[in-house]
Amino acid sequence: MAIFGLLIISHGSRSPEWVRQVDEAAAGVRLPDDIPVVSCFLEIVDGRLISDGIRELEDKGVTDIIAVPLFVSAGSTHVDEIAYSLGVVPSPSTETELKPLPMKARIHWTGPVDDDPIVAQIIYDKIEPMSQVPSEEILFLIGHGSGEPGFYEKWRGTLERLAGRVRLLGGFAGAETATLLPDELGTRLAEITRHYPGKAVLAAPLFMGEGFFTQTVIPSRMKGWVCRYNGEGMLPHPLVSRWIEEKAGYFLN
């Protein structure tokens, strides 16, 4: 008989607040009491790496681990290397220092956030306070992106599908997207100015949490452009926990 456990995998940060927000999202997951939930990190957070999380669940008798990568897009090379380390894919698509992790439990992989409708609602909830007249506003969704062949295209797909969902939720006049890698912000903002003259721009970062990219990189690259921007990541938000539950429920129901 399978004994399930849930492993939530995030990137990791030196910010205690960032780690706390991930742990709060994990604590908010509602599963049957006999299913242990563990959050772990790809790097930086000592004693709580992926191997530590696997060990903790196996020590609890878990035979089947539902692995949820709390990452924004399948375009992240981190998602690919984590999948490789867990034996989900036979080889990584890019260079990685990660090795296959020793484990006895079977892994059930859910995939990252991508363009889930729950995520669209989270993004809308974060930007709605900035909105005044949606029919006169353009949503501008900004993601990290990737310079790796194939990964950029996945990022582009995630951003465009999510932007379309959020535009419908908010009733905005339009929705545009850009990545930081490659740096598309200036080019996209110039296009928005030409295509939507007189419209206000609501810029939203598509990042799991707030940090260097949301607080420093994006504002610096938008300098000189008129945008409304709050720099908020997806966390904290209760729907992050609901998204995790939905992904885990696929294997439990």
Image (cartoon, rainbow, N blue to C red):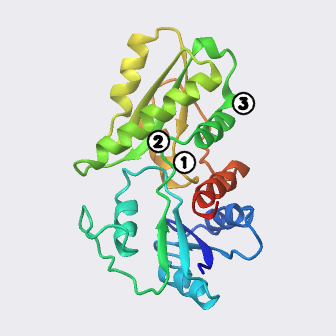
| Marks 1 & 2, CB-CB < 8 Å contact | yes
Q: Which of the image's four quarters has the N terminus?
A: bottom right
Indicate whether 186 appears above or below 101.
above
Query: Whole-percent x and y of residue 247?
Result: 58, 56
Q: Is residue 19 left or right of residue 189?
A: right
Q: Is residue 119 visible?
A: yes
The amino acid on which the numbered mark 1 sits, given as a three-letter code, is Gln
In space, the residues marked 3 and 1 are separated at their CA atoms by 18 Å
- Residue annotated with mark 1: 215
Q: Position of residue 153 (x, y in %)?
A: 30, 41
Q: CA distance from mark 3 to mark 2?
A: 20 Å
**Residue 184 versus residue 245: which sits nearer the camera?**
245
Which residue is located at x 57 percent, y 62 percent?
Answer: 251
Q: Amino acid at mark 3?
A: Pro
Q: Residue at x 32, y 67 (%)?
A: 89
* Circle 3 residue: 129
Q: Toward which corner of the image does residue 4 lie, by quadrant?
A: bottom right
CA neighbours of label 2 inside 10 A, class few (<14), some (14 to 19), many (20+): many
Foreground of the two, 214 or 175? 175
Question: Is residue 203 found left or right of 159 in the rendered image?
Answer: right
Residue 136 relative to residue 162: left or right = right
Q: Is residue 32 left or right of residue 69?
A: right
Q: Which residue is mark 2?
A: 218
Q: Which residue is painted at 58% across and 52% down in the image?
A: 210
| Chain-order first, disc 3 or disc 1 | 3
**Disc 3 or 2, which lies upstream in sequence?**
3
Residue 182 visible within the image: no
The amino acid type, in three-letter code, at marker 2 is Ile
